[in-house]
Image (cartoon, rainbow, N blue to C red):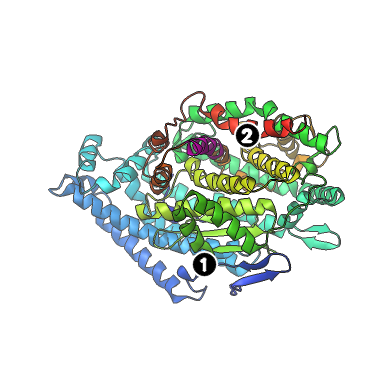
Amino acid sequence: MSRNPAQQPPAPFSATAQPATTSGTKLGELPVWDLSDLYSGLGDPAIARDMAEVSDEAVAFEERYKGKLQELLAGPDGAAALSSAIATFEGMQDKAGRLISYAGLLRAQDLADPARAKFMSDIQEQLTKLGLNLLFFELELNRLDDGVLDAALADPALVHYRPWVEDIRKEKPYQLDDRLEQLFHETSLTGRGAWNRLFDETVAGLTFDLDGAEVSLEEALNRLQDSDETVRAGAAAVLSRVFSENVRHFALIMNTLAKDKEISDRWRGFRDVADSRHLANRVEAPVVDALETAVSEAFPRLSHRYYALKAKWFGKDRLEHWDRNAPLPKVAQKTYDWTEARQVVLDAYGGFSPRMAEIAEQFFDRRWIDAPARAGKSPGAFAHPTVPSAHPYVLLNYLGRPRDVMTLAHELGHGVHQVLAAPNGALMAPTPLTLAETASVFGEMLTFRAILKRTTDPVARRALIASKVEDMINTVVRQIAFYRFERKVHTERRQGELPVERLNAIWMEVQRESLGPAINLSEGYETWWVYISHFIHAPFYVYAYAFGDCLVNSLYAIYENASDGFAERYFEMLAAGGTKHHSELLAPFGLDATRPDFWSMGLKLLESLIDELEAGEE
C-alpha cells in the first residue's frame, strides 16, 4: 500500500565500470551514465555506511514513536512534534531511496550480470527488513482521530506536510491490521518481487537468431521498423518463434502475479481489478472509465482509418502486423546522430521556454543519460527520479531513428518534471502516474511541432505526420487495448488459472478490435503479449499513457492560443509534484477531466492529423 519512494526501484534494471561514451559509425559518441552522484561503485564504503545508518535510524524511530502518535499530537506542541517526526521519516526515505535507486540503475545497464542482480537483491532484502520498522508510521497516522488530526494540519508547524498526510489517509479504508501489513510487506520479496525478477531475467536472456547473429529483444523489435519488408517479416517470424517457445513460462508468471494481486485486493477490500491502481494514481474510476469508453468508441475513426490509409500507401488491401510501424515506402528514413538529436530536442524545448532547455541540457552535460543499446541492457526507455537529494537519470536504447529522437524528448520531459518537483521532498515529489506522463508527452509534442514547422517537402511532411500519428496511436489506442487486455485477464483469473490458449485468445480479441480490419494478425502474433513489462511490473499502469496524451493534446491547444503566462502556469503544475489532485492542477488551464467531453476533446488532435493525411490523397 505504501507509496514511499524508498520502496520503488526503477522500472525494469559487472560491477565493472562503463565507459563515459561509446562511439558508432553513424550515431557519434553516445553518453553512458555517471552514477557517482549516488555512489562510486559496488565497492563504495558509503553504501554499507548509509545502509547501517538508515537501519539504525529506523530502529530508533520505531522505539521513539510507535504507539505514541496520539499522545504526541495531544501534547502542547503536538503539530510541531508530528512535523518533526515526519521530517525524520522523510530523511530516511531519501537515504533508502538513494540505495535502491543506485542498485536499480546499475542493474538496468546489464540485466544479465549476476553481480548486479545479487547486489539489487541484497539491497531489496535489507530495505524490506528496514521497512518493517517504519511500517507502523503510516498505519498509525491513519488511526488518529480525524478531528484532532485536521486541527493539527491547520497549524503552520504542520502545514507543509498536509498534502502528504491527506494523501496517506486516502489509503485508510484499505488498510489492514499491523501484523497483516507486516506479512504483506515481508513476503513481497519472495512473492511479487521474485516473479518480477524472474520476468526481467527471462526477457534479458532471450536471443533471436537473425542473419546468423544472436541479437537481443530490443534489436529484434527494432527491425520491425526497417525499410525492407523482408527484414521486417523475418524479424517477426523469429520473434513469434522465440515467444512461442517461452510462452508457458510467461503464462505462469502472468497467472501467478494476477492471483497475487487478487489475494491482496480481496483482503484489502478493493472490488474492481483496477481499483488499487486508480487509488495509487489518485484518479477516480469513472474518469478512467470515461477515458476507456471515449478511446474505444474512437477506434474506427483513429486506428482503423489510419491503417486503411497506410495499407493504401503500401499498395495492399491489408497490412501484415509487422508493417504496422514500418516507414512509409519510397521515403528515406533519416538517421539522427547524437549531436543532432540533442540539438533538435533542446531547440524545441528552448522555443517553449529557455528555462526548460536549461534544465534538459544538464542531462547531456552531466552524463545523466545512458544512451547506447547493449546486450543485456534493460529494453525500452525510462526516466528515474532517484531522490530529491540527487537528480534523475534517463535510460535509452538510442539507434538514431526519428522515433528515438521522440523518445529522447519524451524521457527528458519526465526528467524536467522530476527536477522541478524535487524540492517538495522525498514524500511529496512523486507524481501520480496519470499526471507523470504529462510533461513527457508535452515534450514530444514540442519536438514534433518544431520539426514539422521546418519541414516543407510534401513527401517528408507526410512521413513526419504519419510517424506522429503512429506514435499517438501507440500511446492512446494501443495502451487502452493493453488496459482492456489486463482487465479481461485479471477478471477471468479470479475464476481460476488461464491457460496459454486463453491468454493468447484474449490478446487477439483486443488487438483485432483496436487495430481494425486493415491489419492482418497472422499466426504467431497471438503470443506477443509476453514481453510487455508493464503487465508484470505495474498492472494497469498503461492507461496513464493515454491519459497523458489526451491531456497534453488539450493543453497544447490552449498553449497555441494562450496569452503570456502559459509557461509559468505549466511549470507551476510540474513543480507541484504529488502535492495536488489532478483537478487542482488542471483548473488554471480551464480543464476538467471529469467532464464527459474532456477525452473526446483530447482525441480531436489525432483525428485532425489523420484528416490532413487523408486530404493529401484527394
User: Residue at left 47%, top 56%?
Assistant: 385
In this view of the protein, can residue 353 be seen by the observer? yes
- The residues bearing labels 2 and 1 have C-alpha atoms spaced at a distance of 35 Å
Q: Amino acid at mark 1?
A: Asp
How far from the left and from the top, in percent, is residue 332?
Answer: 78, 51
Among the two numbered marks 2 and 1 on one chain, the one whose residue lies closer to the N terminus: 1
Q: Which residue is mark 2?
A: 606
The answer to whether residue 348 is left or right of residue 162 is right
- Tag 2: Cα neighbours inside 10 Å, few (<14), some, or many (≥20)? many
Q: Is residue 513 above or below residue 202?
A: above
Residue 32: name its quadrant: bottom right
Residue 551 among magenta residues: yes
Quadrant, the C terminus:
top right
- Taking the view exactly as shown, the residue that stands out farthest to the front is 456
The dominant secondary structure in magenta is helix
Q: Which residues are magenta?
A: 547-561
Q: Are marks 2 and 1 in contact (CB under 8 Å)?
A: no
How far from the left and from the top, in percent, is residue 79?
Answer: 20, 47
Q: Amino acid at mark 2?
A: Leu
Q: Which residue is mark 1?
A: 365
The answer to whether residue 524 is left or right of residue 337 is right
Residue 606 among magenta residues: no
Q: Looking at this view, is 427 or 231 the one in front? A: 231
Query: Of helix, strand and loop, which one carries label 2?
Result: helix
Residue 508: name its quadrant: top right
